[in-house]
Amino acid sequence: MEYTKTNNELRSVFDPDKTEIKIPGSDIRILNSEFISDSVPNVFFNKNDVSVSENIKFSYPLFVPADSNSKKVILLLHGLNERSWLKYLAWAYYLSLNTGSYVVLFPISFHINRSPVMWKDPRAMMPFLKERKMTYGEIEMSSFANIVLSKRLTEDPMRFFNSGYRTVCDIVKLMSLIKKGEHPVIPSGSRVNIFAYSIGAFLAQIILMGNPENLFSDSRLFMFCGGSVFSNMQGTSKLIMDSLAYDKVYNFYMADFEKEIKERGPLIDFLFNSQIGMAFRSMIDLERFRKFRENVLQRLKEQTRSIALSKDTVIPAKGIVKTMNWKTRDNHNPAHIWDFPFPYSHENPFPIFDTPLSLSVDRSFERLFSEASLFLA
């Protein structure tokens, strides 16, 4: 598959408002499937977030393989502060084409189409950017692209946890529908694996570690640019969040989170008494609940694989290796460090060039997704 060409073709035909999208020259098609997020009591969330209707009723793209009787599914989880699926269309297409799987592109709470349209409108965001500058002065990496997430996390760092928790509950609901044969398209009893990128990898690790309702006992997880505990990440970026928001979130989860949750009734029960709650707490820092985390990751080592990029500054390779390859005497290390022979970043690992560099991007994309397809097939 020629990544650059396919990426451009898929971008040109994708329409999130269409029920079905035919891909020219392919037997794979895309369905935009409706979903209602109704599994979590509102008591868990910031009161200003409960009324955001886009976060409750939304659609997700489903790549349907040529063999619609396939009982293989790949759940694809995206990165932090994404506002569009365009970056991931070629990723999903390649995985479906080379594994024969249904590929579900599921949006994290308050991301992509689970947020008001104005959140991705530069003109609508400029007043908020000016207001933030007037209130706090110059802030490193402040931009119209990250102003909403930066503002929301500065106001309430618990939104980082809340968004992830709601997404986990939504994914559990979706996977239960598939397992029970109640999904309108995917065959019953299908096996679900996960491809996860960036913060989606953090979320997916916690899901596998917590294994809610035993839905992921046999699932495999392939991570790209992810796999690190929270404390080894560096989220400051013009496309993710500004430095003020990152410092606020980092300090909250490193210093205040464990004290804060003891004062919240429903939350304390979940975080202290559930496997997935403990998984989240153990993935904050290497020294926090270390024995719990390492025991679970050791048990999952055959089910997990991560490819880190050496020039990634958002989720550095060193942090991924420290989290996943902690048992140094073991010959099987689930995390590996790669590099690409072209300018890339965490936020844009496969840039589009109209120069000979595009061939190098195509080859690197093929290498990465061939590895993922072999692992997830």
Image: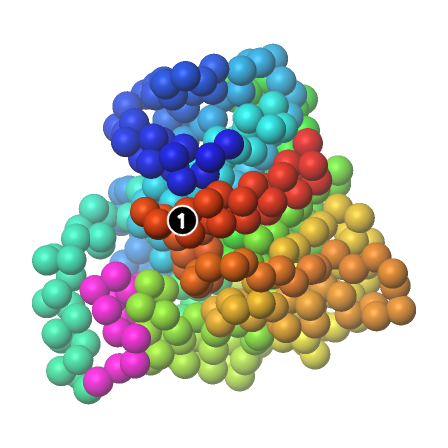
Q: What residue sits right under mark 1 in the picture?
A: 356
In the image, residue 310 sits, relative to residue 122, either above or below, namely below
In the image, residue 190 sits, relative to residue 148, either above or below, namely above
- Kindly identify the residue that appears in the image at 69 percent across and 60 percent down: 336
Q: Is 339 a magenta residue?
A: no
Residue 245 % position (x, y): 35, 75
In the image, residue 300 sits, relative to residue 65, either above or below, namely below
Residue 40 % position (x, y): 47, 46
In the image, residue 4 sits, relative to residue 20, either above or below, namely below
- Kindly identify the residue that appears in the image at 80 percent across and 48 percent down: 302
Q: Is residue 112 visible?
A: no
**Residue 88, picture quadrant:** top left
* Amino acid, disc 1: Pro
Q: Residue furthest bottom?
A: 137
Residue 367 % position (x, y): 60, 45
Residues drawn in magenta: 138-155
- Kindly identify the residue that appears in the image at 19 percent across and 76 percent down: 132
Who is closer to the viewer here, 170 or 237? 237
Residue 269 % position (x, y): 61, 61
Q: Residue furthest front?
A: 356
Q: Is residue 62 visible?
A: yes
- Kindly identify the residue that appears in the image at 41 percent across and 56 percent down: 348
Give left or right: position of 26 versus 52. right
Q: Residues within 10 Å of mark 1 (few under 14, many from 20)?
A: few
Q: How many marks?
A: 1
